[in-house]
Image: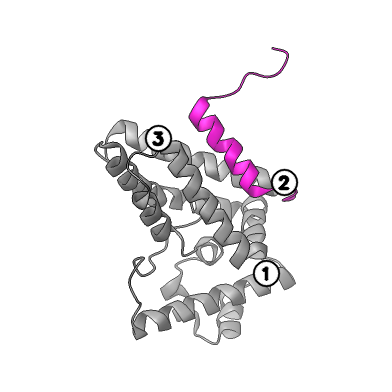
Amino acid sequence: MAATAHSSPTAPGTQPGLRERKKMKTRIAIREATYRLIQEQGYDATTVEQIAEAAEVSPSTVFRYFPAKEDIVLTDEYDALLEAELRARPADEPWFDSLRYVLTKAIGLGNSEEPEVTRLRTRLMVEIPAVRSRMMESMSVTGRLLCRAIGERVGRDPDSLEVRVFAMSLIGGLLETSLYWAEGGHREDFADVVDRAVDVLEHGLPVAKGS
């Protein structure tokens, strides 16, 4: 999602080959080992060497798949899927309805497949400056994907100022939404929090009651 780093899974609708399946299996093993170690001993105490040993790969393999430890925490497999989902929405559907649909689907995937990982990832974004910094670096990649999808949808150049500003406003807003959710101890329903964020993008900042 927007609040995750970019990844390059097989394009939606295609069947991955043996080589791609092996690569995905290795990526998943590395990520699962990382999450397990962090939950047991904390982020700072977890080293790439420990991750490699737990995933039964070499440290060089870990770095081949993930250039930095922060990337293991942040990377997911949803960006390409979500881009395709956005493009697949009916052309006459209001833009924000399409956006809400795609985000709701993404949240559903995260909650059904790896709810604890989603909470861990957002908590680390709050607690670990290096993770938060890496997340901000990766936002431009996800933003470019979103620019392409938005440009096609609204008939504008993906590199136009208007599309770029809107896309990055959305990406930044979703990042802040994730931080807000984690800072609140994940007590609120994440789908509701995201819906409130989209309301702000669609309608602007609401006037405070009594103003």
Q: Secondary structure at mark 1?
A: helix
Alpha-carbon neighbours of circle 1 within 10 Å: few (<14), some, or many (≥20)? some
Name which residue lies at 39% across and 50% down: 86
Q: Name the residue located 25 percent from the left edge and 37 percent from the top edge.
A: 155
Q: Earlier in the sequence, mark 2 or mark 1?
A: 1
Q: How crowded is the residue under tag 3: few (<14 C-alpha within 10 Å), some, or many (20+)? A: some
Give percent across and percent down for residue 124.
64, 57
Q: CA distance from mark 2 to mark 3?
A: 26 Å
Q: Secondary structure at mark 3?
A: helix
Q: Nearer the viewer, residue 189 or 157?
A: 189
Q: Earlier in the sequence, mark 2 or mark 3?
A: 3
Residue 46 location in percent, x, y? Answer: 65, 71
Residue type beneath disc 3: Phe
The residue that disc 3 covers is 166
Tell whether 108 sits left or right of 102.
Answer: right
Q: Nearer the viewer, residue 66 or 194?
A: 194
Going from N to C along the chain, the mark reached first, 1 or 3, is: 1
Give the label, 2 or 1, closer to the camera: 2
Residue in the foreground of this view, choosing between 187 and 86? 86
- Residue 119 can be seen, yes or no: yes
In reply to whether residue 59 is colored magenta, the answer given is: no
Residue 50 lies in quadrant = bottom right
Residue denoted by label 2: 188
Q: Residue at x 53, y 67 (%)?
A: 72
Image side of residue 31 versus residue 147, left or right:
right
> Crowding at label 2, few (<14), some or many (≥20) Cα neighbours within 10 Å?
few
Residue linked to disc 1: 38
